[in-house]
Image (cartoon, helix red, strand yellow):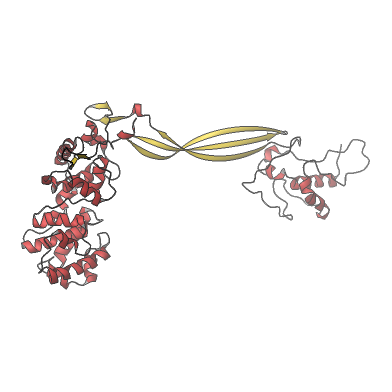
Amino acid sequence: MRTSRISQETSKIVQALSPSTKLLSQRRTRSFAVSPAPPAANASSPITTVKPSEGSSEHDADSSSLSSVPSDISFDIEDPPPSLHLPSPHPTRKRKRKAGTGGPSTTTITSTSTSVTTPTSPRKLGIKDEDDGDRNVKKARRRPAKKVVNEGGEVEIHPPAHWEEIYDAVREMRKTALAPVDTMGCETLAEEHLTPKDKRFQTLIALMLSSQTKDTTNALAMRALQTALPSPGLTLASILAVDPATLNQLIFPVGFHNNKTRYIKATALILRDRFAGDIPDTIDGLMSLPGVGPKMAYLCLSAAWGRTEGIGVDVHVHRITNLWGWHATKTPEETRAALQAWLPRERWHEINKLLVGFGQTICLPVGRRCGECTLSAKGLCPSAVVGTKRAVKRVKREEVVEEAGKVLKVEEEEVVVAKEEDVVVEDIN
């Protein structure tokens, strides 16, 4: 049997314009041309027209345009005809063939995702210790300070449970771990050869610079002021005389240096005019200075004047005491009031440096080293990290395969770890 050239060329064009061509463009080795049936052996005339196949009615307009296509056109069936400018298939459009078309197989893949939190099994949690090996996790509860009314009707504050054991354990750990606050804290930065008045002034300046700044950076800025300013160095007179731009440049490494430059210059004027060139010796007087809050005031009064009238609570003291469950406070000022209600007064001065150093070496803000902490081993810290839980993202892939009018559905599931969170002792039931 032989088919005329017109029939062959027409068949090629129909294939290029039919819906299955877009799927066939990726399958050259599996080309199933949707061509009209060949003429019978006793056909007496060549085929000049083509009837569209069933299921292609939406493309009748394209098929009717065949009369305008030159009969001698020649192109690869996998490529769109150069003169027709066929649009490329939309990458996300889902196409399905009608049943019974007898065309080639098609595949459609869709995916959905859901997030599921999968905690580590509490029964398998443990703390690794180099000396003792694996050991079971000891349950620790939050037992904060409590208000109790005594027989006389007065309200008493009972300290948190095991607070002395916790405090003493931290003291022992701090003896073996040198922290930046031990050598570069604000109390250590004033120059020893200066007069007591100038040393107090330097302590105040160090505290003003320390806000939102690491101890190492603060020490460098203080050293720059002590060496770059005219002799005798960092004093009230030199701060009054220095240009604000120069001062700002000297303290540039610290956080919020622009604001601190203004605060220091304004403070110098207040000290000269209202306090006879010295720093105030009261909490109210210190808090009247620009940029000085309760924490700085209590620390400065204790370090500069040797009088401890309150606890200096910074972010480390606030964070760590809440992790221990001593209280549930929202701000450092609330923490200060809660601690002063029951903590013995002789510990008010040392607790700041003790917990700041502990927070710099072991109980870090990010990545707490609970495996090195004695409190974790003794079951004294309810916030000790003993494992992780994974927030996983489950991706569901749905693959629809159509072959010879039959639809086959295949589902696959892929698990992707999206986030890991710490599991602490108090989370274990």
- Asked if residue 71 can be seen in this view, the reply is no
Is 397 placed left or right of 186 in the picture?
Answer: right
Image coordinates of residue 199 in percent, x first then y, are 9, 61
Q: Residue 108: x and y, percent?
A: 63, 39
- The spot of residue 320 in percent (x, y) is 24, 43
Left/right placement of residue 17 relative to residue 311 reads right
Q: How many marks?
A: 0
Q: Quadrant of residue 152?
A: top left
Q: Residue furthest right?
A: 44
Between 111 and 317, the one nearer to me in the picture: 317
Q: Nearer the viewer, residue 49 or 156?
A: 156
* 242 displayed left or right of 86: left
| Residue extending furthest toward the front | 152
Looking at the rendered image, the quarter that the N terminus falls into is top right
Query: What residue appears at the point 51 percent right and 35 percent down from the top-left corner?
Result: 414
Tell which of 351 and 281 is nearer to you: 281
The residue shown at (52%, 40%) is 113
85 lies above or below 154: below
Question: Is residue 64 shown above or below 370?
Answer: below
Measured as percent of width and height from the top left, residue 309 is found at: 13, 53
Find residue 206 and report its image quarter.
Answer: bottom left
In the image, taking residue 289 as reference, residue 304 lies left or right, namely left
Q: Is residue 301 visible?
A: yes
In the picture, which quadrant includes the C terminus? top left
